[in-house]
Amino acid sequence: MERIIRNSAKALIIKDGKMLAIKIKDENEEWYIMPGGGQETEELLSKAVCREVAEELGINVVAKELVFVIEGVHGEKFHRVDLVFLCEYLGEIKNTVLHSDTNQVGYDWLEIESLNQAPLYPSKLRRQIMNLYEGKEYKVYLGNEGNGDQEVTD
C-alpha cells in the first residue's frame, strides 16, 4: 500500500504563560494535542490553521510565524507533516458549531513552565515550546516522532 503525505497546520496559542491544547481521552488515558488539522487543496497553511482552530475550539486566531516542523512517518495511515504556527489569540467566536476530533473531550490551558512533564504530544515539542517562550534557542525541525518512541521529558 502506498502511503500519502498529509500536511497538518497546528496552532501554538500562548496566553498568560499558558498554551492552549486539546484534551483527548480514550478508554485508558488522557493526553493533549495542539489544535489544528489537515490542509485542504489550494488552501494556504496559515489559513488552514485559523480555520481548524475555529472549527475545533470556536476560537479566532491569527497565524504569525511558522515555528516548528515535526513528522509522523510511522504509526498512521499516512505520513504526517505537522507545521506549527505561533498564533495570536483574538477571542471566542460566538455561536460557532464545533467539529471535534475523535476522542476530543475539551481543552485546557497548560502551564508552559512545566510543559516538559505534561502529556502533550508529539512530546518532542514540549522542551522546544518552553525554549521559544523563554527566549532561548530552539530547534525548528524536530524530525520524526512515532508510536513507540521514547517520550521526551527533559
Image: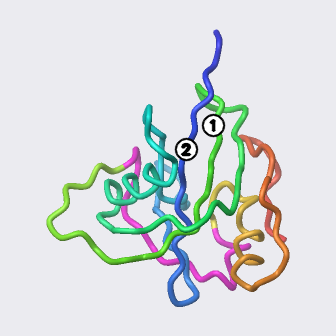
SS under mark 2: strand
Q: Which residues are magenta?
A: 101-118
Q: Which sits earlier in the primary sequence, circle 1 or circle 2?
A: 2
Which label sits on residue 80?
1
Task: Locate residue 118, reporting x and y percent.
Answer: 65, 71
Residue 59, relative to residue 78: is it above or below? Answer: below
Cα gap from disc 1 to disc 2, whole angstroms? 7 Å
**Which residue is located at x 40 percent, y 52 percent?**
52
> In this image, 113 relative to 90: left or right?
right
**Which residue is located at x 82 percent, y 52 percent?**
150
> In this image, 79 relative to 24: left or right?
right
Q: Quadrant of the C terminus?
A: bottom right
Task: Locate residue 76, reporting x and y percent.
Answer: 61, 31
Q: Which residue is mark 2?
A: 8
Q: Quadrant of the N terminus?
A: top right
> In this image, 66 relative to 105: left or right?
right
